[in-house]
Amino acid sequence: MRAVAQGARADLEIAGSSSRYYWSGDSDSGSTPGPGAPGVVTFDAPAIAEVGAPIKVAFESPYKGRALVTLETHRVLEHRWMDVDAGTNSFEFTAKEFTPNVYASAMVFKDPHLESKESFLPARATGSASVRLAPETFTHEVTITTPDEVRSESKLDVSINVSGDVAGSYATVAIIDEGVLGLTNFKTPDPNAEIFARRALGVDAFDTFGWAFRREAAVGGDSDYDDGSADAGLGRRQTIKPVAIWTGPVEVPKSGKLDLSFDLPLYRGKLRVMAVVVGPKRIGSADANVVVRDPINLQATLPRFMSGGDVTQVPIFVTNSSGAERTISVSFEAFEDLEEGASVPPQAGEIVRVLGDASRSVTLADGDSERVVFTVEALRQSGAARFSVAAVFGDLSSRVEELV
């Protein structure tokens, strides 16, 4: 050890038993301490705005001071300084060009003399909000016109109207059972949402309180995508075929009006009609719901399976919704359901048999229901049987079929 002052020098040597040494303290103890984490600025911004229209944004400042407010994408579009008070503050920006979304950001610097003139207590807070811009110049306005209600196994007429320039545009239409769509909360396709998906903020913010301001990566997030990896119920037999109709691409006429007609299968419930229109410069989509209901409604409680020799009763609930009293003929039929190309073995005989009358009549006032019971016997150990129930009054009819 050596000390030197005004030409004088003093040395002190301390003997040791080892020529090696180490320092067990923090290796970064001599570096400049990093700044504390910034506070949070919360925003109240519109979910969607228009290009060229003022965008008003409000934010909550945790303290009085000065704020640098910006409008950003992958670059800073606009910026300005403003005085802020603790609490709600607001500012306006205008997006002059289309981009899927813009970010309104604010970095607030606290007045360091806020507590007193003698004190110096600086602080900062930051935050941002994403605002979607409507892709109006790239969007078709599409409307679907359908009847509110149709009958099962009838025609469903669908009219699609597309506004604006439709040259080179094509439409696809899908008609799907709403019950099936509800299993996965399926949303009507909106290509604009995918093409103009929200983009990440491409601007890094730095301040003199620290060497860099780092934002933690977001964890999780919303997703409309279902990869189908969940249990799909392997081994189950599809006894009821859901409604799923798709047109494929259909060219949109110059008038912008497209009329289509679809043959509905045996079905009762609610259908969703979805249309997507795509052109060289514009994209649009729309949906509508249609209720499929018959004037005579049947609800059959059929067995899931039967073995040879089993006898079961099949209750059929008949409801008259025709608007007047009706005498309805209800018939029951059971027959073997063969796969395409299959044949019945010689001397195999019937697979099921209806015991007793296979047809009954019931008289029901409008809105009334009654239960009709049929008895069925299984005659073979293996195979598949199709049960068919029909209710008829004049030109009014209803039918239920199911595989057992």
Image: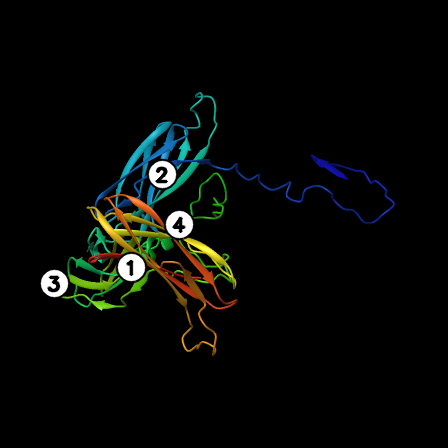
Mark 3 residue type: Ser
Model colouring: rainbow
Q: Earlier in the sequence, mark 4 or mark 1?
A: 1
Question: Closest to the observer: 154 or 170?
Answer: 154
Measure how far apart labels 3 and 4 are at the Cα level: 45 Å
Judging by the rendered image, the residue that carries numbered circle 4 is 203
Describe residue 237's horizontal placement relative to residue 159 as left or right. Answer: right
Name the amino acid type tagged 2.
Answer: Leu
Q: Residues within 10 Å of mark 1 (few under 14, many from 20)?
A: many
Asked if the residue under mark 1 is in contact with the one under mark 2, i.e. CB atoms within 8 Å, the reply is no
On the image, which quarter does residue 71 sit in? top left
Spot the residue most to the front.
356
Kindly identify which residue carries mark 1. 175
Disc 4 residue type (three-letter): Val
Q: Earlier in the sequence, mark 3 or mark 2?
A: 2
The disc placed on residue 68 is 2
Local packing at callout 2 (Cα closer than 10 Å; few below 14, some 14-19, many 20+) is some
Q: Quadrant of residue 368?
A: top left
Q: Check contact, mark 3 vs mark 1: CB within 8 A.
A: no
In the rendered structure, are the residues bearing label 3 and label 4 in contact, judged by CB atoms less than 8 Å apart? no
Residue 184 in view here: no
Q: Earlier in the sequence, mark 3 or mark 1?
A: 1
Q: Total marks drawn? A: 4
Q: Nearer the viewer, mark 2 or mark 1?
A: 1
Q: CA distance from mark 4 to mark 1?
A: 44 Å
